Amino acid sequence: MTQPPTRAARGARLLLVLTTFTLAGCISGMEPGNPAPVVVEVTSDRTAVAPGQNVVVLLVATPRGSRSLRYAKLTLSGAYVATDSVTGSGTQPVTIERTYTIPPATPRGQILVTGVAVATDGSSARVDGTINVSP
């Protein structure tokens, strides 16, 4: 008779999950038949976090073709609030990687993670994802 996995084993498997919120549309300046002018990807090392724990969030913004990136912005809102941004580096990708410590008094809820990238020609991309907060 096989025993179901223990809670600790299930938790260990959950920690190995890398959540990726990928661009699924929401691109302005895109013409039919042409690739996205700007691509934004956001990843986090957790799908859920408890108050007092850390979560690592990574944003990578990549301009396509000869476009130059104006800026990239990472915003967390909801149960935890933070904003980080970087100016573009021409036609090279930019990265924002941050470790956020969720305060012990943070209520149960969700953190909305939003990544935005804007090229110098005005084209842009946005991606949203969530991280659950539960004690």
Image (cartoon, rainbow, N blue to C red):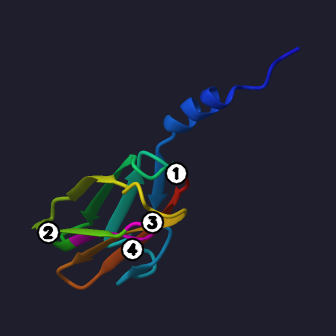
Give the CA separation, mark 2 to mark 4: 16 Å
| Circle on res. 88 | 2
Q: 102 or 2: nearer the eye?
A: 102
| Circle on res. 48 | 1
Dot placed on the residue nearer the N-terminal end, 1 or 4: 1
Q: Residue at x 44, y 75 (%)?
A: 33
Region in magenta: 72-80
Image quarter in which the N terminus is found = top right
Secondary element at image label 3: loop
Q: Residue at x 64, y 32 (%)?
A: 10
Question: Is residue 78 magenta-colored?
Answer: yes
Q: Nearer the viewer, mark 1 or mark 4?
A: 1
Q: Residue furthest right?
A: 1
Check disc 3: other Cα within 10 Å, few if <14, some if 14-19, many if 20+: some
Instruction: Report whether 44 appears left or right of 72.
Output: right
Instruction: Report whether 100 appears left or right of 113.
Output: left
Determine which residue is flagged by label 4.
Answer: 126
Check disc 2: other Cα within 10 Å, few if <14, some if 14-19, many if 20+: many
- The x and y percentages for residue 130 are 50, 63
Determine which residue is flagged by label 3.
Answer: 23
Q: 4 or 97: nearer the eye?
A: 4
Dot placed on the residue nearer the N-terminal end, 2 or 4: 2
Type of amino acid under label 2: Gly
Check disc 1: other Cα within 10 Å, few if <14, some if 14-19, many if 20+: some
Dot placed on the residue nearer the N-terminal end, 3 or 2: 3
Discs 3, 4 touching: Cβ within 8 Å:
yes
Check disc 4: other Cα within 10 Å, few if <14, some if 14-19, many if 20+: many
Dot placed on the residue nearer the N-terminal end, 1 or 2: 1
Discs 2, 4 touching: Cβ within 8 Å:
no
Residue 12's image quarter?
Answer: top right
Secondary element at image label 2: strand
